[in-house]
Amino acid sequence: MAKHQPEEVRRRQILDAAKRCFIERGLDATTMRDIARIAGLSLGGIYFHFASKEDIFRAVCDETYGTVLRKWRESPERAGQSAESLLRELAAINLDMLDSEPDYFRLALVLNGAAVVNDDLKRVKRDHHRGFVDFLAAALERGVAAGELVAHDTGAIAEGIVALFDGFYLRRAIDADVTPRTSAIAAIDAILKGLAKQN
């Protein structure tokens, strides 16, 4: 019998087991019994915390899609930090995650595939995507206001930067030999050079 644990510990155990199952088996092939087995809990223990596999999946979606954005938001915005410095710091966070957390991106592929056909999951994905774009656009707008960057369509450039990293996430998830650091830095360099205000 599993020892009594605080609710948050059990939820964490279940979500971690579900992530592993979704990565290894995909959403459709994963059952509540699979999640219970990997979590080391009874089926009743899983249902005590989550009503269905879909509930678990939504919780995993919300947590996974929010990971990078939380890291971006927690990135220290020191007074006077330039837009260029902030963008490079945010790129470094993404690149470090690509190197250190490959399962994150494999899981994101599973979630994105499910979001294509599930409107509720699509909404979760869209909300997080909008958070990325808005965060980047705000940094670019500060750069324009400070006279560091030329005026430009900050929303469009922010969308392009997010798409750039989405592409690297996909490539890394399906090809472990891909090393995006050089390419991503070169692309960010080109974007920043194109936006830099000439003195």
Image: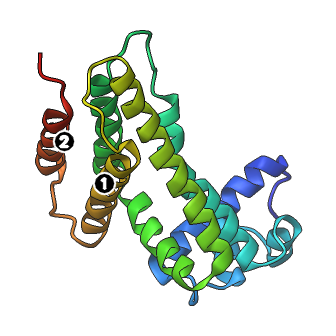
Residue shown at the point (81%, 69%) measured from the top left: 50
Residue, x 34% and y 60% (percent of image)?
A: 166
> Does 8 sit left or right of 122 as displayed?
right
Q: Is residue 56 left or right of residue 21?
A: right
- Label 2: which residue? 191
Image quadrant in which you'd find residue 189: top left
Say whether residue 100 is visible. yes
Specify the farthest residue to the top.
Answer: 79
Whether residue 16 is visible, yes or no, is: no
Give 83 or 13, whichever is nearer the viewer.
83
The residue shown at (40%, 68%) is 106
Are the residues at dot 2 and dot 1 in contact (C-beta closer than 8 Å)? yes
Residue 189: mark in rendering: none
Q: Classify 168 as above or below 51.
A: above
Picture layout, residue 73 above or below residue 62: above
Q: Where is the C terminus found, in terms of image quarters?
A: top left
Coordinates of residue 69 in the picture (x, y in percent) = 50, 44
Q: Residue at x 12, y 50 (%)?
A: 183
Residue 81 point in image, percent of width and height? 36, 15
Task: Name the residue type under label 2.
Answer: Ile
Front residue (pair 81, 199): 199
Label count reads 2
Instruction: Find residue 18 and report its horizontal and vertical position in percent.
Output: 61, 69
In-image side of 91 versus 45 (left or right):
left
Q: SS of the residue at dot 2?
A: helix
